[in-house]
Image (cartoon, helix red, strand yellow):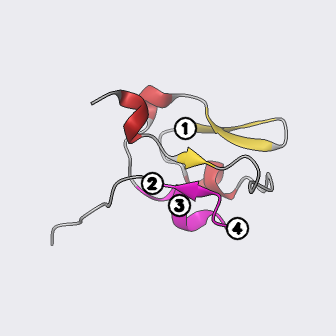
Amino acid sequence: MALETWLPIIDEASCTGCGDCVAVCPTGALAMAGDLAVVADPEACNYCGLCEPACPVGAINLPYEIVWEE
């Protein structure tokens, strides 16, 4: 499976540029590019899932369900 299929999808039309997702990204994979959040370092993304709920407008979608084991 290609790396791109595992990356968060950021809807540019919905992104308000608040930077909340960038602030919670533990690996620095997300960054601001002008007024929009982008996946700036795809190889750094560990698909932790923190960015999706951090977005107040729902502009980030993780295409695969994350299942946590207890």
Indicate the amino acid at tag 1: Gly
Callout 4: SS: loop
Label 4 belongs to which residue?
57
Q: Residue at x 49, y 46 (%)?
A: 8
For the residues labelled 1 and 2, say whether their Cβ atoms are less than 8 Å apart: no
Q: Separation of disc 2 and disc 3 at Cα?
A: 7 Å
State the mark number for residue 52: 3
Please report whichever mark, 1 or 4, sits nearer to the chain's N-terminal start: 1
Indicate the amino acid at tag 4: Val
x and y percentages locating residue 4 in the rendered image: 43, 31
Q: Residue at x 84, y 35 (%)?
A: 34
Indicate the amino acid at tag 2: Leu
Residue 6 part of the magenta-drawn span: no
Q: Which residues fall within the magenta stretch?
A: 49-62
Please report whichever mark, 1 or 3, sits nearer to the chain's N-terminal start: 1
Q: Residue at x 37, y 41 (%)?
A: 46
Q: Separation of disc 4 and disc 3 at Cα?
A: 10 Å
Q: Separation of disc 1 and disc 3 at Cα?
A: 15 Å
x and y percentages locating residue 40 in the rendered image: 60, 30
Residue at the far bottom in the pictured view: 70
Please report whichever mark, 1 or 2, sits nearer to the chain's N-terminal start: 1
Please report whichever mark, 4 or 2, sits nearer to the chain's N-terminal start: 4
State the mark number for residue 28: 1
State the mark number for residue 37: none
Q: Is residue 70 rendered to the left or right of residue 21?
A: left
Label 2 belongs to which residue?
62
Identify which residue, 33 or 11, lies in the foreground: 11
Kindly report which numbered mark, 1 or 3, lies closer to the viewer in this rendering.
Answer: 3
